[in-house]
Amino acid sequence: MTTYKLALIPGDGIGGDVTDAAMAVVQAAARRHDFTVQATTFDWSCAHYLRTGAMMPEDGIETLRGFDAIYLGAVGWPHTVPDSVSLHGLLLPIRKAFNQYANIRPHRLLPGVESPLRSDGFDILCIRENTEGEYSGAGGRVHQGMVNEVAVETAIFTRAGVERILRFAFEQAQARRGHLTSVTKSNAQKYSMVFWDEVTREVAADYPDVTVSHMHIDAMAARMVMAPESLDVVVASNLFGDILTDLGAAIQGGLGFAASANICPDGTGPSMFEPVHGSAPDIAGQNIANPIAAIWSAAMMLQHLGEDRAADTIIAAIEAATAQGIGTVPGSHSTDAITAAILSALEADA
Ligand code: NAD
Ligand code: IPM
Ligand code: MN
């Protein structure tokens, strides 16, 4: 029987609740499909930082390297640790260290879910560049606290980095409906985004079966609300992809539904799976976080590990639960109740 070694980082706030839910579902799916998931939990979090002075130990990345996959709940507790410390001490270094340059975020409406913005009929796959661009961490501040203070944050785009995420996105489009929309702001940003558009045109020549559209991020934000059904695969830089995927979450009913996979496509390190949402301090500790985004992310993990049947079973169980009205309206069901409904749909499907 295949055994997968999984590094589990519940993190902060609702991270722990949704990770528990996702792992209960993963273990149930593993039993049904004859594989084993051996999870090792790491308590790396803002609480860990307050205790030790670091979000993770110095050899944290090396420790993670030995695992088949990483599953993360959420990181951040801004009341006690600044986000600039917590995210740069845990989540972002993992994405970079393992070259998880492709962040896959699907957006579609599950049966029975009420979206504040849209009815059914959209199925978008957002491919977010995940290791460079606006998140390069290059920059600085001078004359701090003075009237002439200047802060610079440099977005770094490399040809290799842009080309590989575009190729990844074109391949996703080939496997879906054959349409790719590349999102930039090349009317205002004259270096990086013009460069991105050029590389898109070059790479497109290798994928004649994919039709390509170029859109500016502002127009795209409107398009996602007004006509999301016109979109198939969307590719964007790190920051634009971050923003668009919270919008994608909104059109699919809320942040509790948006899943994500940080993929290391060349397999040189483990990939990491996590919901799009954060630690949600406003609802933490109340057993009301929607675990569906986390459970869906776990299904993406099993698919990545090659357990496609288990992944499909989990998605079907989520859909069976929402079709019965479980978890479809914020606050109507507890985290535990939604998880229990998904688990029982999974068992019933045996
Ligand atoms: P957030 O995603 O945590 O919350 C935004 C809103 O969505 C809140 O009203 C919250 O209650 C709601 N929400 C989020 N997840 C939900 C769920 N599963 N079910 C129901 N409602 C849900 O974003 P934020 O408030 O900007 O960030 C809080 C902290 O999380 C910050 O420290 C932030 O930096 C961090 N963060 C971490 C990640 C991550 O670890 N990947 C992602 C986003 C934000
Ligand atoms: C996400 C989050 C992170 C990001 C933050 C917490 C650094 O918003 O995964 O979408 O911007 O990548
Ligand atoms: Mn985000």
Image (cartoon, rainbow, N blue to C red):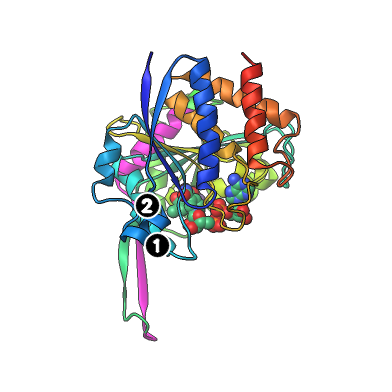
- State the residue at coordinates (24%, 51%): 58
User: Which residue corresponds to mark 2?
Assistant: 133
Crowding near the residue tagged with mark 2, few <14, some 14–19, many ≥20 C-alpha atoms within 10 Å: many
Q: Is the C-beta of the residue carrying label 1 under 8 Å from the nearest atom of ligand 1? A: no
**Is 147 left or right of 183, judged from the image as shown?**
left
Q: Position of residue 2 (x, y in %)?
A: 37, 16
- State the residue at coordinates (37%, 24%): 4
**Residue 4, can we see it?**
yes
Residue 14 part of the magenta segment:
no
Q: Quadrant of residue 102?
A: top left
Q: Position of residue 64 (x, y in %)?
A: 30, 39
Residue 158 part of the magenta segment:
yes
User: Which residue corresponds to mark 1?
Assistant: 84
As helix, strand or loop, the secondary structure at mark 1 comes to helix
- Choose between 295 and 152: the one closer to the eye: 295
What's the magenta region? 146-172
Q: Position of residue 215 (x, y in %)?
A: 54, 46
Crowding near the residue tagged with mark 1, few <14, some 14–19, many ≥20 C-alpha atoms within 10 Å: few
Tag 2: residue type? Gly
- State the residue at coordinates (35%, 59%): 51
**Residue 210, can we see it?**
no
- Choose between 232 and 322: the one closer to the eye: 322
The N terminus sits in image quarter: top left
Q: Position of residue 155 (x, y in %)?
A: 36, 57
Tag 1: residue type? Ser
Q: Which mark is residue 101?
A: none
187 shown above or below 302: below
Q: Which is more foreground, mark 1 or mark 2?
A: 1
The C terminus sits in image quarter: top right
For the residues bearing labels 1 and 2, Cβ distance under 8 angstroms: no
